[in-house]
Image (cartoon, helix red, strand yellow):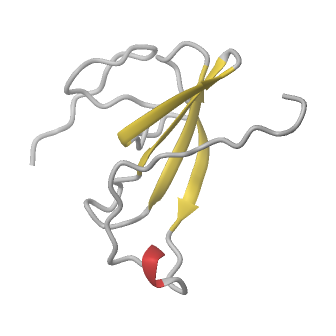
Amino acid sequence: MPVPEFSPSGFIAPGKLFRDDGGGVAQLHGVGIQQFGDRFYAWGENKSRGPLFTGVACHASTDLATWTSLGDALTLDEGIPELGPDRIIERPRCSRRRMDGM
């Protein structure tokens, strides 16, 4: 198995993995990005277990190159068939509902 190549800190390069500010691989496969104010949020498939469902990771950034992991927005739950460990999730998206006065 080939050793993965990583982008230098603070950079994202095609074909290379990049780390979040905690040193973990940014699990953002099939990423969707939204901007709220001066911050960008990204949601993507967590591929730490290969193609099987692990979770939908959420990260935040102010510069699109340095990302902070906010944990999983959706996690594996063996009690819910649609969120079981044998499931596959593709290109997760998040929508925002505007609150009154915003």
Which residue lies most toward the front here? 100
Which residue lies most toward the right here? 101
Coordinates of residue 40 in the picture (x, y in percent): 58, 24
Residue 51's quadrant in the figure? bottom left
Q: Relative to 95, is 73 above or below?
A: below
Coordinates of residue 18 in the picture (x, y in percent): 37, 28
Instruction: Name the residue: 42% across, 64% down.
Output: 54
Q: Nearer the viewer, residue 65 or 91?
A: 91
Instruction: Name the residue: 35% across, 61% down.
Output: 89
Q: Relative to 75, is 3 above or below?
A: above
Q: Relative to 94, is 34 above or below?
A: above
Q: Nearer the viewer, residue 49 or 78?
A: 78
Coordinates of residue 53 in the picture (x, y in percent): 37, 66
Residue 79's quadrant in the figure? bottom right
Coordinates of residue 37 in the picture (x, y in percent): 71, 18
Q: Nearer the viewer, residue 21 or 61?
A: 61
Quarter of the figure that contains the C terminus:
top right
Instruction: Name the residue: 44% across, 77% down.
Output: 82
